[in-house]
Amino acid sequence: MTPRPIPAAGLMLAATLFAGCASTQPSPPTGSPSAAELDAMTPNTSGAPQGVAIDFEPAKPLSPLDDPNNPLYKKVIYFDYDTAEIPPDGADLLKLHAGYLYNTPGASVTVEGHTDERGTRGYNLALGDRRADTVQRFLVAEGVPPAKLSRLSYGEERPAAPASGERAWALNRRVELVY
């Protein structure tokens, strides 16, 4: 078998490829690029035509009620068994919420009382109401206008933990502040 001659077009292609691979150093920039040159160098990922200014709204600050790093993010006060007495840590939390409600126009809250499953339905509704009433009176004593507050008792109807046992019962004996 005899070798075939390489067509002239193939030789031209090979020569072009080798010439393109020559290592040359680019010349250093001679001055600062213009704004148009910067725009041309900046990748456009917005979907808008190149050179079109995009107006971005700054992110709105997170409400303290929605910020997990803010103490106002906690909106649940837990109670001991068969009592409507606010525990000390609950009082501290309620003082923070009272300050927020007092100082924030338009803010209002529903105070929802809950109980665990033990006791009759009627008893639990009454205990949930007593817990909600105690929290509502505490907030009013801290300066919150009564018009910013409403009260509701669910008794045992909306458990936070639907299981039975001490851990679940402790989570269910609560008042929730619903803004």
Image (spheres, rainbow, N blue to C red):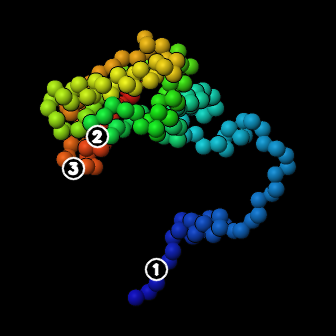
Q: Residue at x 66, y 40 (%)?
A: 40
Label disc, if present, on residue 81 of the rendered structure:
2
Question: In the image, residue 97 lies at what x, y percent?
Answer: 49, 28
In this view, the mark in front (3 or 2): 2
Residues at badges 3 and 2 in contact (C-beta under 8 Å)?
no
Distance between mark 3 and mark 2 Cα atoms: 13 Å
Q: Which residue is mark 3?
A: 165
Residues at badges 2 and 1 in contact (C-beta under 8 Å)?
no
Label disc, if present, on residue 4 of the rendered structure:
1
Q: Residue at x 81, y 51 (%)?
A: 29
Describe the element under mark 3 as helix, strand or loop: loop
Question: In the image, residue 22 lies at what x, y percent?
Answer: 69, 68
Q: Is residue 145 above or below residue 166?
A: above
Quadrant where the C terminus sits is: top left
Q: Is residue 4 above or below residue 44?
A: below
Three-letter code for the amino acid on which mark 3 is drawn: Gly
Residue 78 horizontal side relative to residue 116, left or right? right
Quadrant where the N terminus sits is: bottom left
Which of the marked residues, 3 or 1, is nearer the chain's N terminus?
A: 1
Which of the marked residues, 3 or 2, is nearer the chain's N terminus?
A: 2
Q: Is residue 152 above or below residue 81?
A: above
Q: Nearer the viewer, residue 162 or 83?
A: 83
Distance between mark 2 and mark 1 Cα atoms: 98 Å
Which of the 4 image quadrants contains residue 84? top left
Describe the element under mark 1 as helix, strand or loop: loop
Question: In the image, residue 130 lies at what x, y percent?
Answer: 30, 25
Q: Residue at x 52, y 18 (%)?
A: 143
Three-letter code for the amino acid on which mark 1 is drawn: Arg
Distance between mark 3 and mark 1 Cα atoms: 89 Å
Residue 67 horizontal side relative to residue 17, left or right? left
Residue 36 horizontal side relative to residue 99, left or right? right
Q: Is residue 65 visible?
A: no
